[in-house]
Image: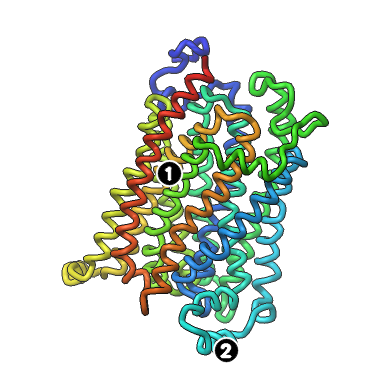
Amino acid sequence: MADIVQGNGQEFGRLRRIFFPLYVYELKKAIPMGFMFFCILFNYTCLRNIKDSLIVTGSGSDAEVIPFLKGSCVAPAAIVFILIYTKASNILTNEHLFYATLTPFILFFGCFAFFIYPNFDVLHFSPETIASWRKAAPECLKWPIAIIGNWSCSLFYILAEIWGSALLSLSFWQFANQITKTSEAKRMYAFFAFMAQMSVLLEGKVGEWCSDISRKVPAGVDAWGISLKYMMGIVVILGIAAMCTYRWIYRHVLTDKRFYDKPELPGNTGKNKKKIPLLQSFKIIFTSFYLGLIVALVVCYGISVNLVEGLWKKQLGMQYPNSNDYSTFMHQFTFYSGIASMTVLIIGGNVIRLCRWFTAAIATPVMLFLLGSSFFIFVLFREHLTAFLLSLSTTPLFCAVIFGALVVAISKAVKYALFDLTKEMAYIPLDEDMKVKGKAVVEVVGGRFGKAGGAWIQFLLLMFLPNADFFTLAPYTFTIFVVICALWMFSVKVLSRRVEAITTKSQQ
């Protein structure tokens, strides 16, 4: 059925309503927004896979270093970032703020691959020095010393973590929320995410080829160094492409009255722009119960998924101790998780468009609770399955790696398809200042503290339980995981009443 009059509720045929509920003229806005999302998510996925490879398989390092990094380094760095970002938002236009946010990241990642890593021995302490420090220091300093010993990899990890919050959750979605109406978001947001998930498929295959290069180079050549140059080169190119696309949207989409009809461009700083002092901005943000509920969702997601991933990555590091092998697996995992995400997005986009906000928002905590609990139970009772698994020519470790990969892939698919989109829709009715500064606090500080919360839990347990690792912590982390999921579901219920009330009011 062809397009009929817009707005009568029957403008699309049945199949088009399910798979492509956009008008042809809207592609001028939807495709560049989706491509910008594509570039940012490709880089985030690539950086996420590499940062884990650098830390988990690094000299003198292990998966237990990750909680220390997230808790003691990433969270403080996120606070510093948000202070700078909030101050800059009073000075720069949205366009220049985006460029200023993205540029330092792509400069560092380019320098890491082409300068820092090739000179690793010169710029870092020797393994013997680090070993002597660890031998002389108390047990509680074992992992902090590993962070210092691999300082460039640790810095890479920190900036890769912040990239997800600063560019993906904050900059892109803040821009989308400013230029998209609630009625458009129900149709367009799933399309943006679907285009972006194509980058996950592409990154999985490109990353797998780059990581598997050790089979194609002569003996004695640093294959991992070559892999880094290829992948970071792509990160830099796509970072520049995202900035160019952002510029094109400002010049050709936001000047089209069909897409943006406000008198000023979003976040434009003119002479009459009201500049709210930094402390006053934070006071307004932290006293908003509405934003507080969104923070609760973000923090609960971060803690719960971090508890599951910590246990999974420990086993993954044991199964693949070589950096290239670990990275190859992660890129293969990325490809299949991309397929899962695109499949769930088709379903999730229609759930968001046809169902209540609560129905779409509650799906993520319920799914993660069911899958995560199954994974914890499997790991806790894996010894009872050893004989059976050996009879199938496999091992409990390998099965735990595959099972954990399935749990994380499906959980992230539901997160991208439903959690992210429903969370972004909750921002749309807010005023301009809350969209910029409130979202910055929620996504960067809330997101980082969510992951840091899970890291601190693991950090404290590792500190106070003698000779503990992620396996021995599993009973404790499982209990905490269940409690956090319950709090998450309760927060969704409370927030749903406010979202539906404020959306109804704004449409009157």
Mark 2 → mark 1, Cα distance in angstroms: 43 Å
Residue 122 or 200: which is nearer the viewer? Answer: 122
Residue 67 bears which disc, if any? none
Left or right, 466 with reference to 432: left
Residue 341 spot, x, y in % from top left: 42, 44
From the image, tell me which residue sits under label 1.
Answer: 415
Task: Identify which amino acid the numbered label 1 is placed on.
Answer: Lys
From the image, tell me which residue sits under label 2.
Answer: 128
Residue 488 figure quarter: top left
Residue 149 can be seen, yes or no: yes
Q: Residues within 10 Å of mark 1 (few under 14, many from 20)?
A: many
Looking at the picture, does residue 406 appear above or below residue 462? Answer: above
Residue 254 spot, x, y in % from top left: 69, 27
Looking at the picture, does residue 454 appear above or below residue 436? Answer: below
Which residue is painted at 42% across and 17% down in the image?
13
Q: Earlier in the sequence, mark 2 or mark 1?
A: 2
Residue 399 spot, x, y in % from top left: 29, 64
